[in-house]
Amino acid sequence: MDENDGAAVRIPPPLVYLGAVILGIVAHAYIAPLPVALSTGLRHSMAMAIAIPGLVLMGGAVGLFRRTGQKPAPWTPTPEIISTGVYRITRNPMYVGMALLQIAIGIGLGNWWIVMLVPVALAVVHITAVRHEERYLEQKFADAYRRYKTAVRRWL
């Protein structure tokens, strides 16, 4: 396998979501607090209810990668298109899962800034990762990937 084979992703997507969480914490502390006006118990329950599907999506994707002998890092070679399991629901289950975790963290911490930065994180991931991954997969797998793209939504 060609060691240069892989999508031209330069920023690890988990760092984008982590950066958004940190930016939300900083904005909450130094710009203006935007608290989630719910009891701690309700906030934590809601956070868990959102985090669990996120973890399921991410865990399901990583599990499929491992079973097929692939690495989940988007800049590594992709020997085959995975279109089973969570990849029947979304073409990007790890990124959707990370977005759900970011929402859960924001609600759990009582910080609307973190939640409001989810669309920003998704846009950055789209520009820095998803576009490159889709271009790579379409070049490598041609019609097979185009059929998959028409059958499964990018996000949800």
Image (cartoon, rainbow, N blue to C red):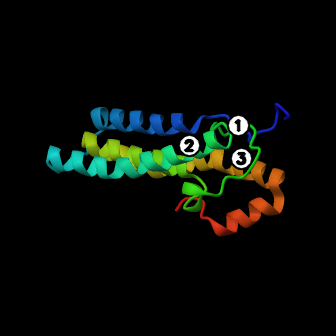
Report the residue at 26% width, 45% height from top.
34
Look at label 3 and name its amino acid: His
Displayed quadrant of residue 129? top right
* Image-based side of 8 in relation to 2, left or right: left
On the image, numbered disc 1 is attached to which residue? 75
Ranked by sequence position, the earlier of labels 3 and 1 is 1
Q: Position of residue 12 (x, y in %)?
A: 59, 35
Element marked by disc 1: loop
Q: Position of residue 110 (x, y in %)?
A: 24, 43
Q: Nearer the viewer, residue 138 or 82?
A: 82
* Dot in front, 3 or 1: 1
Q: Position of residue 88 (x, y in %)?
A: 58, 61
Displayed quadrant of residue 79? top right
View extreme (right): residue: 2
View extreme (front): residue: 67
Instruction: Tell me the distance, in whole angstroms, between the alpha carbons under discs 2 and 3.
Output: 23 Å
Q: Position of residue 114 (x, y in %)?
A: 36, 43
Tell me if residue 120 can be seen: no
Look at label 1 and name its amino acid: Trp
Residue 132: assigned label? 3
On the image, numbered disc 2 is attached to which residue? 63
Report the residue at 49% width, 44% height from top.
59
Look at label 2 and name its amino acid: Gly
Report the residue at 64% width, 49% height from top.
130
Report the residue at 40% width, 52% height from top.
53
